[in-house]
Amino acid sequence: MQDNAQTEEAANGIGAAGPLRCTIDIDTSSAPPAEQFDLFQSWHSSLADVELLCEEFDSFPARERVWQLGSLALAFIEYPGTGYRRRCSSKKNPVLDHWVLSIPHTIPPEGGPARTGQLRWHCLAAAHQDEAEDDGVLCLFFPRNFAFSQPFTLDIRPEMAAFLTDYVLLLHGSFPNRAENDVPYMASATTNLLAACIKPSRDYFFVAQGPIDAVIMARAKKLVAARLADRDLTPDKLCQELGISRSRLYRIFEPVGGVSHYIRRQRLLKTRDALGDSTDGSPIASIAERWGFMDPSTYSRTFKKEFGISPKDARAAGWLGINDTSSAGRPHDVPVSLSSILMNS
């Protein structure tokens, strides 16, 4: 069992140092419902003053997770949204002067993935106030003078703000597959990207090339996923929509076998999912054509080369319920505060 666990961790890129863990993982469930907002307020009492503007509330279920990346800290805070409008104000006598980049998220009433709002930023030492009733926020904290000298305002162009938003979301989404020994790399990459976006220069962009390429890759994958059924999807069209050269797109996708290979594999995965769905009785040729494979024999050979099994056998296995499933959870709770992390960074 131990060997299997080690093999699984290695496959996920997790080394001997162990998986990346939250420095803080707390929620309000330990307090009586009527006192949950008071507990939430106490988490941030040294950073900002938070008021709940609604007149009555039965509870305030909230959770905060924080990951420390060297002198940076990334916090994901979830709380009740609609009907729980809050006002956040800066401290009159601040003890911290860190920058905060915030990305709010809202869960649609009809369900589905959360919608992210526009990037916001401010300095903890400067006068600031805002109101919101979103469902949570992803915050990146970093020292005010960590990589550049700035006053109490940041000049971030709209295209750079969009780029930073994509990067912070990508960084947070990568944490389940990260190890503790990845922290120095993530901190360095994030620092370089912040410098490149906030104070653009040729040197900053050069050192930030890795994280910049990662964001372009993430954007490209989103475009591919959205247009996977489009038979006219080509590398040239991706270049046009991403605003990059063909050579750069090819270089970014080289580690995964090239952009054409990536698109083909994603389409093959879609056909594999459809074949394994016992409620989809469409002919195999129709499923292949749905995802851009017009010649059945070529599709069958390509599918077998990719997965080591024919489409017919894949359908039989899927309908018999032969699937690989795995799950992992690693609760972690350390009694420290976000402000203490920032003070010691």
Image (cartoon, rainbow, N blue to C red):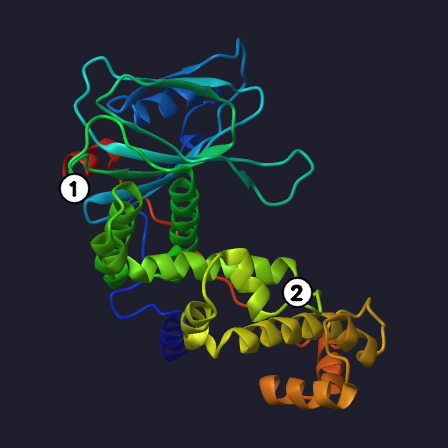
Q: Residue at x 44, y 43 (%)?
A: 162
Quarter of the figure with residue 130: top left
Residue drawn at point x = 61 percent, y = 89 percent: 305
**Left or right position of 127 against 79:** left
Compare residues 163 and 331 and report the one nearer the observer. 163
Secondary structure of residue under mark 2: loop
Measured Cα–Cα span from mark 1 to mark 2: 42 Å
Q: Residue at x 27, y 49 (%)?
A: 196
Question: Looking at this view, is 128 or 283 the one in front?
Answer: 128
Give the label on residue 135, or none.
Answer: none
Q: Where residue 165 sits in the image (x, y, percent)?
A: 42, 44
Instruction: Give the left or right position of residue 218, taking residue 337 as reference.
Output: right
Query: What quarter of the picture does the N terminus occupy?
Result: bottom left
Type of amino acid at the residue the image marks with label 1: Phe
On the question of residue 195 being in view, the answer is yes
Mark 1 sits on what residue? 146
- Most extreme residue toward the top is 55
Q: Could you tell me which residue is drawn at 44 percent across and 58 percent down?
A: 216
In-front residue for pair 138/261: 261
Residue 274 image offset from top left, x and y in percent? 74, 70
| Dot 2 crowding, Cα within 10 Å, few <14, some 14–19, many 20+ | many
Above-or-below relation of 6 to 197: below
The residue at which mark 2 appears reads as 228
Q: Amino acid at mark 2?
A: Leu
Quarter of the image for residue 301 reads bottom right
